[in-house]
């Protein structure tokens, strides 16, 4: 087992960040994309699942990167996060490695909320994949398998059918930055904009539920960044009052993101949201 964790910030509108935000964790995912894109995000997700700060602060989406769990993971020595790769000089993960992984998966683990196993689907031969199937069929609680591959073809259909497939694209990095900038600007505009102007905002998203969801997740991250910045930069006796509107705004955004997954009247939901944010932000 080897680790090469990579500290990657600003992941909060990627598909994996959405999963962390909703808290609906499946036991197996197949992450499709180039290793350079997939691995940092997979490790970020694993840290997020185990982050101690997230357990007490439900509004935090990603890992805090500073609690003891995050620090261990960043140093590659978190006992619940495993990256299983072919042994030196070998092309494939051995069946013994898969068996050892299964044993590990069924052991109760003290450190961390989730055991996370990262595996390259490309390095799984048929026998290993079949062996993996057993644990995917009866997954232990609080265990997440993150398989990764460049494309769907790298993996057996039987394994594929038991995984939630997530495509991670390179462009998401650029789109993410752009979206964060737009979301930050949008939040900053609230004091200047009239209610009428704000109410027309929901209109442009009428047929784009996914788009508005991503935008609001970006806005949510902006709120968290502001809260963090204010907490660091102001004397403690002032912090509570300063961050209060941002905490409440984050709660409003989170509620809306959750409601968007359900069959709700989107326009009405967004209209109510902008009015609440207007009250909080100016
Ligand atoms: Zn943490």
Image (tube, helix red, strand yellow):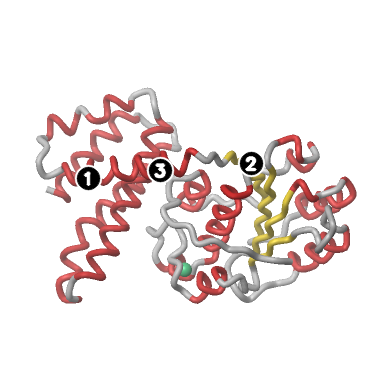
The residue beneath circle 1 is 187
Q: Secondary structure at mark 2?
A: strand
The residue beneath circle 3 is 176
Residue 126 sits in quarter: top right
Q: Residue at x 43, y 57 (%)?
A: 9
Badge 1 or badge 3: first in the primary sequence: 3
Q: Closer to us: mark 1 or mark 3?
A: 3
Tell whether 113 sits left or right of 154.
Answer: left
Q: CA distance from mark 1 to mark 2?
A: 33 Å
Q: Residue at x 56, y 55 (%)?
A: 40
In front here: 149 or 240? 149
Q: Are marks 1 and 2 in contact (CB under 8 Å)?
A: no
Residue 131: image location, x then y, percent:
86, 53
Q: CA distance from mark 2 to mark 3?
A: 18 Å
Tell whether 158 sits left or right of 225.
Answer: right
Q: Secondary structure at mark 3?
A: helix
Mark 2 close to ligand 1, CB under 8 Å:
no
Tell whether 252 sits left or right of 48.
Answer: left
Residue 180: image location, x then y, percent:
33, 45
Mark 3 close to ligand 1, CB under 8 Å:
no
Q: Is residue 269 above or below residue 23?
A: above
Residue 38: image location, x then y, percent:
59, 49
Residue 181: image location, x then y, percent:
29, 44
Q: Which mark is residue 4?
A: none
Q: Residue at x 22, y 45 (%)?
A: 187
Pointer 2: residues within 10 angstroms few (<14), some, or many (20+)?
Answer: many
Q: CA distance from mark 1 to mark 3?
A: 16 Å
Q: Closer to us: mark 1 or mark 2?
A: 2
In front here: 30 or 52? 30
The residue beneath circle 2 is 32
Residue 242 sits in quarter: bottom left
């Amino acid at each position: 087992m080897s680790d090469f964790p990579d500290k990657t910030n600003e992941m909060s509108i990627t598909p994996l960040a959405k999963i962390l935000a909703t808290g609906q964790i499946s036991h197996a995912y197949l992450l499709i994309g180039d290793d350079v894109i997939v691995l940092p995000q997979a490790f970020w997700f694993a840290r997020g699942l185990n982050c101690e700060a997230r357990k007490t602060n439900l509004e935090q989406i990603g890992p805090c990167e500073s609690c003891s769990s995050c620090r261990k993971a960043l140093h590659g020595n978190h006992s619940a996060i495993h990256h299983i790769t072919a042994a030196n000089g070998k092309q494939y993960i051995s069946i013994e490695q898969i068996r050892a992984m299964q044993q590990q998966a069924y052991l109760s683990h003290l450190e961390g909320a989730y055991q996370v196993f990262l595996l390259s689907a490309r390095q799984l031969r048929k026998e290993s994949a079949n062996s993996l199937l057993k644990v995917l069929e009866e997954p232990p609680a609080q265990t997440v398998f993150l398989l990764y591959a460049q494309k769907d073809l790298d993996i057996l259909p039987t394994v594929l059918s038991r995984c939630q497939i997530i495509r991670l694209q390179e462009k998401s990095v650029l789109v993410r930055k752009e979206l964060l900038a737009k979301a930050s600007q949008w939040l900053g505009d609230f004091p200047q904009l009239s209610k009428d102007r704000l109410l027309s905002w929901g209109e442009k998203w009428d047929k784009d539920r996914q788009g508005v969801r991503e935008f609001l997740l970006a806005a949510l991250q902006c709120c968290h960044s502001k809260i963090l910045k204010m907490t660091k930069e102001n004397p403690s006796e002032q912090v509570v009052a300063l961050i209060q509107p941002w905490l409440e705004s984050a709660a409003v955004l989170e509620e809306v993101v959750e409601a968007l997954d359900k069959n709700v009247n989107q326009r009405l939901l967004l209209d109510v949201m902008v009015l609440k944010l207007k009250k909080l932000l100016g």
